[in-house]
Amino acid sequence: MPALERPLIYGNLRKPGYTVDLDCYLRHGGYEALRKAVAMKPEDVCKEVETSGLRGRGGAGFPTGMKWKFLDRKSGKPAYLVVNADESEPGTYKDRQIIYRDPHQMLEGIAITAWAIQARQAFVYIRGEFQHGAKILRRAIEEAKAKGFLGANILGSGYSCEVVVHRGGGCYVCGEETGLIESLEGKRGYPRIKPPYFPAVLGLYNCPTIVNNAETMAQVRHVLAMGGAEFAKIGIPGDSGTHIWGVSGLVKRPGLYEIEAGKATFGELLFDLCGGPLDGRTFKAIIPGGSSTKILRFGERFKGKLPNGQEFDWALEDIPLDANSIAACGTGLGTGGTIVLDDSVEMIQALANLNAFYAHETCGQCTPCREGSLWLSRISKRIVAGGGRDEDVPMLLDIANQVAGRTICAHGEAVAWPVQSAVPKFKDEYLESVRRHRDGTAPASPQLI
Amino acid sequence: MSLKPETLAQADAIVAQYPQARSATLPLLHLVQEDRGHIAPEDEAWIAAKVGVTPMQVREVVTFYPMFRLAPVGRRHIRVCRTLSCALRGSYALMAELEKALGCARGETSADGNFTLEFVECIADCGCGPVVQVDHALHENVTPDQGAAFAAKVRASLSDPAYGKAAPAPGTPEWNG
């Protein structure tokens, strides 16, 4: 059996003795892809990325090359590159590894991208809590500038690009690209009203701006290193490259596993790589791609048609790990941050935990999200506290239905999707929880709220 | 108490990094908070003048972001992740242990001013839960049964002024303080 993992992004940082300094990166072929890129025309670099089929790694999976195409090049305003390293989707912890253990890989991708879109200024918006990560990155930028990989006159090309590391303030909604831009402008992180739909037209300081995820930058580096057509051969048509699966929760070996898109299944990930459930437990459900993606229940059957016309009938364990297959099962690959729940978990507590997160993180601009997230949190908490009513369970769903699609940004969907997906799948258990907590007969389970 | 000269000296260089001065609001708030431990009204006025906005426009930023605070915290700021991945691994039970061992309730500062204990939302280290960030130092896999020993370690760190401040040296995979 071939190895399930294919480390591309984590290829170097997993090597024993690999360090964050420039010399080590150069010994591993570092900045060769940038050398290649600056010898090409910027539009040809864009074409390579388009050919590669690379999709963004921030959760939405938007084709990177297409995003770059939307850049308004006619306005005469400067273009900006903003790298979203505000990793804050619960269950997601892949970018942290890149920043802390292989910062130059991301910086090389940034330099290539900046060249491709002809940005002379790039920002890395990094989580405020990554204090050390910001220091590591700043040190790496200084090293790269000293060798001409960043800063003035990059590799003698006459082209210059400065990179500034900007720390956030611990706010989930600043991971939303327009909220991030507002935050970078020194304001509250209120997501902007759409249209304009893309910051590529009106972004930072009302200038054309490309916002890309931190891992996407690292992927771009590999696109250039091997060429777009070669990169497109990794994975499957429509989802190329590797995905980093960050498994957390109740499995034997939680961790980060980098797998070629579509070349393994959830069963292989959870049983072969993660070692299966803890002793004496059985798996109950997973939240596949960060807490905002819809929950999947073990024992469910997933039937339907893939975009290529192929019909499928899968158990959860059979679902291939690629964007199209997972989307066809009614959820999303998201960030690949898979949270695993087993039979010890009381599902209403898991839901109450996530509801509390979204209620804490709503920015408060839009009434449906501000009020809806708070009520979802309150109602699910009162069920656990023994004050629930039978009508609370359908009410959760009713509230969620009034939030999704009625807000400025996707936080509304993030609030609603866990409820909208979990209530139909675990309705009987929720109703039993309402009664048992009310009667004081709820069995012991790990406290999640 | 006023800000240290080295804090003041860094401010202009930070502002100069940005095409528009207002972008320096968050970095200056971080800078001041590192120095003073919290954001005082005079800091808001000082930052407002540096970036060309009103003090109220700085205040609305301070109150929007969970990391900024208007009042001091204890000498060690202990943040336990409570979001689902960490909760599944026992962060609620861990919190109960830490409350006992440190003598303060969640959301509060101990009477001796040594510890502020808080639940926070996901800090992006989900595979190593429960995780606890103490000042700048991240601690992974702090299970509830290690709660008391962990609290003792944090107490011992009070005598180390550099605790958690230094960035990991190049070549070390270690950032856990």
Image (cartoon, coloured by chain):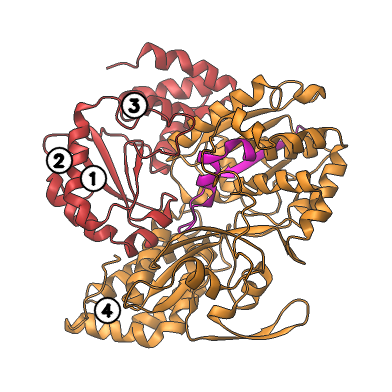
For the residues labelled 2 and 3, the Cα–Cα distance comes to 25 Å
User: Which is more N-terminal, label 1 or label 2?
Assistant: 2
The x, y position of residue A443, in whole percent, is 22, 80
For the residues labelled 3 and 4, the Cα–Cα distance comes to 44 Å
Kind of residue at disc 2: Ser
Identify the magenta region.
Answer: A77-106
Chain name for mark 3: B
Circle 1 SS class: strand
For the residues labelled 4 and 2, the Cα–Cα distance comes to 34 Å
Q: Residue at x 17, y 37 (%)?
A: B155
Kind of residue at disc 3: Pro
For the residue carrying disc 2, how many other residues have a C-alpha within 10 Å: few (<14), some (14-19), or many (20+)?
some
User: Which is more N-terminal, label 3 or label 2?
Assistant: 3
User: Can you see residue B144?
Assistant: yes
Residue A431 tag number? none
Q: Which residue is mark 3?
A: B41
Which chain can be seen in orange?
A
Q: Is residue B150 above or below residue A435?
A: above
Q: Residue at x 38, y 54 (%)?
A: B128
Q: Quadrant of residue B8?
A: top left
Q: Are marks 3 and 4 on the same chain?
A: no
Chain name for mark 1: B
Image-based side of A385 in relation to A131, left or right: left
For the residue carrying disc 1, how many other residues have a C-alpha within 10 Å: few (<14), some (14-19), or many (20+)?
many
For the residues labelled 2 and 1, the Cα–Cα distance comes to 8 Å
Q: Which residue is mark 2?
A: B110
